[in-house]
Amino acid sequence: MTPRKISHFGILVHDADASTEHWCGAFGFQVVKDLVIDVEGIRSVFISLGGTWDEMVIEIMEPLDKADMTNALSKRLATAGEGFYHLCLEVDDIAGSGKELQDRGMTVLMRAPVSADAQPRWLVHPKDANGVMVEAIAERV
């Protein structure tokens, strides 16, 4: 499995608006896209230095219902607090690369598209990647 590139990394936060304002004000980032992903119960604000997808992007992630402990992000936020959440890679073949990692003994969770215009993706459990959740997409959101 050879990724094309690193797409983005995710930061889990309590307040996406305050965090976005901080990253944009303190470090000069610009908003690329702000969206709610209802099926996953999160709000994601994607930011980059130039405000485009054509560069490294940060995903600021806030659970919609922080009291919902069935939501992985809410649970992580409650137990570990804010911080680095995941690394996302772009790959050419979601199914093939996910199967290749499974064949190597990794725990791979295949995920359905989150919306009609989205692609399927996979997640590698943090226990199989030095404590980091790794996500793969075919193209950016």
Image (cartoon, grey):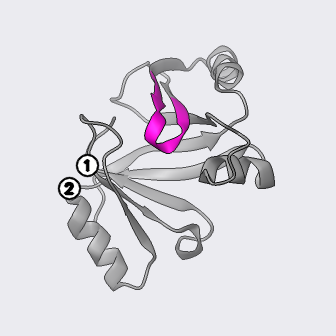
Amino acid residing under circle 1: Ala
* 62 vs 94: above or below: above
Mark 2 is on which residue type?
Asp
Which secondary structure type mostly characterizes the magenta part of the structure? strand
Give the residues drawn in magenta, as a range: 34-44
- What residue is rendered at 71% in x and 39% in y? 66
Pointer 2 residue = 92
Q: Find residue 81 and report its horizontal and vertical position in percent.
A: 78, 47
| Residue 120 drawn at (x, y percent) | 28, 52
Residue drawn at x 47%, y 35% as measured from the top left: 38
Q: Nearer the viewer, residue 77 or 54?
A: 77
CA separation in Å, label 1 and label 2: 6 Å
Q: Are marks 1 and 2 in contact (CB under 8 Å)?
A: yes
The answer, for residue 91, to whether it is visible in the render is yes
At 53% from the left and 75% from the top, the residue drawn is 128
Q: Position of residue 125 (x, y in %)?
A: 52, 68
Q: Quadrant of the C terminus?
A: top left
